[in-house]
Image: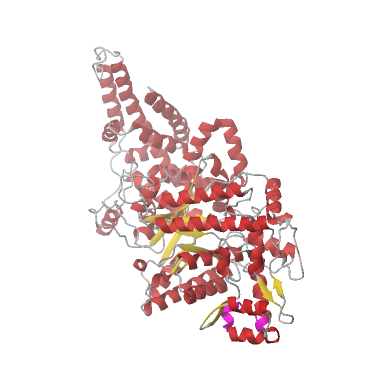
Amino acid sequence: MALLRSLSAQRTTINLVYSRNTSTNGGTAAAAAVANGNGLRRAQALHTTNNNNNSKNNNTNANSDGYAATDSETANILSTLRQVLQKQHQQLQWQNLVLSSVVAGNAGIGGGGGGGGGFYSHSTTRSLHSAARNQQAQVAPAEIAVDDEAKQRKREALKPVEPKPAGTPQRDPLDVSFNDPLAAFKSKTTWELVRAYVVYMICSSEKLVEHNMKLMKVAKQILGQRLFTSLMKATFYGHFVAGEDQIKIIPTLERLRSFGVKPILDYSVEEDISQEEAEKREVESSVSSAGDVKDDGTMPQYHVDKSFADRRYKVSSARTYFYLNEATCERNMETFIKCLEAVSVDDAKVPRAVALGATFGTGITAIKLTALGRPQLLLQLSEVIMRTRKYMEDLVGGQGNVLTHHKTIKDLEKYYASVGDNKDVQEFLKNVTSDKEGILHLFPWSGIVDENSQLSDTFRVPDPQTGQMRRLISQIPPKEEEMFRNMIRRLNTIVKTAAELDVRIMIDAEQTYFQPAISRITLEMMRKYNKEKAIVFNTYQCYLRESFREVGTDLEQAKRQNFYFGAKLVRGAYMEQERARAQALGYSDPVNPNYEATTEMYHKTLTECLRRIKLFKDSGEDAKKIGIMVASHNEDTVRFAIEKMKEIGISPEDKVICFGQLLGMCDYITFPLGQAGYSAYKYIPYGPVEEVLPYLSRRAQENKGVLKKIQKEKRLLAAEIRRRAFRGQLFYKPKGNYVPI
């Protein structure tokens, strides 16, 4: 009975949409007839399939036609969807007749049941035959002429490829124009394609996107928790989020893997707090209990300003953590560890039918350092790093960092000659790190990842005139020193767990006033853990003017200290905020002047990384000493990377270059790459529906800002839905035979 009520409700929904559409579209019935050539056989097949799955498909297709056509592409897709609705309307009539007879027979009703023993009554049988005749009568003669031989071959090529026998992974040729809808969406059900199209249509509406959070909250109040959750799963949540927890996302991970795509997991739960609360938390956690000390060498960008304390300001694509207390940071650490376990090959953590985990040791987890500690400590450490650079520039009389000047210990001894007999100066010189090419570090930076060292004692330099040691960081109270050690302990725990589980860690980039500290800590983690492979990856934002120099410096450090270097290259997430803050606080704008300059920076930085990989390869060294993720939704950048790989002789099998995009965005790039044998990743968010609403809001905002990409994705989605409708593949079940490299 429950199933019957469910199907009845679906029929009512479809009838509403169907009646509206048929009143305005006289030619729809003929098109539907072409698409439904084998209606009776499909109805009989449906009788033996899973009715719950059919219910889901029927509901979603019914809901997909609630938008007016605004252009020819939308008109085409709506026309196709109307045909789907007609077909499902007929199928539901058939199913309800069958189910009615079952219910009647089981209850001893209907004349032919014989106390529940009969399956069909005579009247029901007549009704079924009548319905079948009516459906067959609607089938129009075939209207598609036989194409020439070339077109016939093309149609054959578009057929779903049968999986090859186990042990022979499939590989497809790559269309670098990224215009092949079959390659883009063969991993999707038709319902998922319809849902994606509807989501992109909503994202095309500026008013809907602008007020999306308010609309979601109003919808929740009107619909109630249960219906609101169902609505979200049928739209935005279902499209952009993989599931509610690390168990429920497993089917998504396994399907991705079967189509050659690997996961980057991110538990995307965020607090939905007010601007006032965000500002209050940020100011309190960004100022030392000893006060906001500002001396002559103070750099304003590394001090909190209330106007920009809400770090979500003018940021639509990056998650933001606001410090509350140490217990919250501990919970964040535990969450990151659960992400690691979800993508690991350790099946003892999550028992599965498959012998190995969904990622086969290729999974990645993304984390943010601001989730693990007090932001004040990152601000202070960032200022120390930048003041150290200034000190070095004064010392050598030029711009640049320690590595670029190739100064030796002897050069430093000469510089401090007048105070060379000072014990503090001698101790300082003893701790300077150098190699045959010159000085690497003025300080023992390893101290920042040593849970036993003190920041206040580490960052001191001698005055060249007096020999007196000067602090480059203000005195940190013992309690805050302990907080910093706790942050480093949490990060050490996460990275150590990743190494044990054979999962990689990507430490996300954040605002420029945090980034010097984040990059320095990340590099020290690389030096500590990337001894045999790249476990830890840093993130570089190429819209920054210093990106190329920063990447080059870090590559040089990795080479000279002999550790594996991992980098994720992105365009960046904080551009508007960074520009506004720089102007307000009076320091130079850290962002490139325009989009073209950012693209040039990205390509230049990527080319330098590839050049160094080739040097390793040509010299017989391990090319995997450098691992790069091209994290971009820009297909021109992806093409550039592929062309450069071919140009300098780097193949996908070298496993040194990978590509990444967000779940629910640019599938037409990710899946063709994975299916062609390139290392391709999807950034996989997950979490309970209620708690990922801020994430969904950001995704809607981000899609509004890339309408050109949306138009292409919509066009490809429409093409694939039409192809399936006219080839009788509306109930296509994705089944891949690809193995990620």
For residue 488, say whether it is visible. yes
Q: Is residue 507 above or below residue 14?
A: below
The percent coordinates of residue 357 (x first, y second) are 35, 51
Q: Is residue 184 magenta?
A: no
The percent coordinates of residue 607 (x first, y second) are 47, 73
Figure quadrant of residue 363 = bottom left
Q: Residue shown at 43%/34% (left/top)? A: 59
The percent coordinates of residue 553 (x first, y second) are 54, 74
The percent coordinates of residue 196 (x first, y second) are 46, 46
Q: Is residue 332 above or below residue 219?
A: below
Figure quadrant of residue 128 = top left
Q: Residue shown at 55%/31% (left/top)? A: 223
Quarter of the image for the C terminus: give it: bottom left
For residue 714, say whether it is visible. no
Q: Residue shown at 53%/67% (left/top)? A: 523
Front residue (pair 477, 374): 477
Q: Is residue 307 above or below residue 727?
A: below
Front residue (pair 487, 300): 487
Front residue (pair 573, 299): 299
Q: What stretch is highlighted in magenta?
A: 395-408
Q: Is residue 396 magenta?
A: yes
Front residue (pair 650, 418): 418
Q: Is 120 displayed left or right of 68 in the figure?
A: left
Quarter of the image for the N terminus: give it: top left
